[in-house]
Amino acid sequence: MELTYDNIKKVMKSKGYKFFEGNLNINRIGIRTTQKATNNFDDYFVLLWEEDGKQNIFIDKNFTTDPGLYYLQKELLNPSGCAILAPGQYLGLHIIGLHRGQYEAFVQNKACTIYRDRNLDNVLDCNPASIAIGVYGINQHHGYDSLRVNKNSAGCQVHRYKKDLAFVLKIAKKSAKIYGRSFTYTLLEEKDF
């Protein structure tokens, strides 16, 4: 999988998604790998933006787009099953706010599409029959520098390290001064590349 500015832009356009261009007009992109087992920070987060005439890319290889084992096996927060964000582009999905009232993060602001997994195993089940659309608290936050995902995600998009979320928030705040307070999030899959 080639994660370069141009290649990611090409994939986004091939899927018919908006690719934001112009000074500090950011693209926040998660990439779900082919790993079906959960509880690892084995996905990618990519931030693409232009600043002062230069194209920039930030790649976080310690990210998860999947729920942790705890919420898949032990505590279903919804009787229909644990939330798994469906791939797609979600315009204006997040604003900067407090994750569970605790610290600054990207907080869900608009509806998104999720799968519901309720068979209590450690494999992600993305059954189209389980799809739901709504506001479920699918935030983008950090995982307290934890080794495993565990309780750090019940469907959220999670950076393993606090420093990585802090960097993305720093760029997003600069962007917000120009483009407003809502931010689009796109979830791609490894097979898109």
Image (cartoon, grey):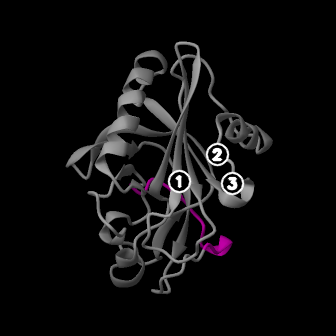
Can you say whether 138 is above or below 27 in the image? below
User: At which x and y percent is residue 24?
Assistant: 51, 21
Label 2: how many residues lie within 10 Å, few (<14), some (14-19) or many (20+)? some
191 w.r.t. 101: above or below: below
Question: Is there a contact, CB below 8 Å, between mark 3 and mark 2?
Answer: yes
Specify whether residue 136 is painted magenta: yes
Q: Nearer the viewer, residue 76 or 65?
A: 65
Picture disc at residue 151: none
Mark 1 to mark 3: distance in Å? 11 Å
* Callout 3 secondary element: loop
Q: Is residue 138 left or right of residue 142?
A: right
**Residue picked out by circle 1:** 44
Quadrant where the N terminus is found in the figure: bottom right
Residue ID at (48%, 82%):
122
Look at mark 3 in the image and give the residue it sits on.
Answer: 1
| Label 1, label 2: how far apart the Cα atoms are | 10 Å
Q: Which mark is residue 3?
A: 2
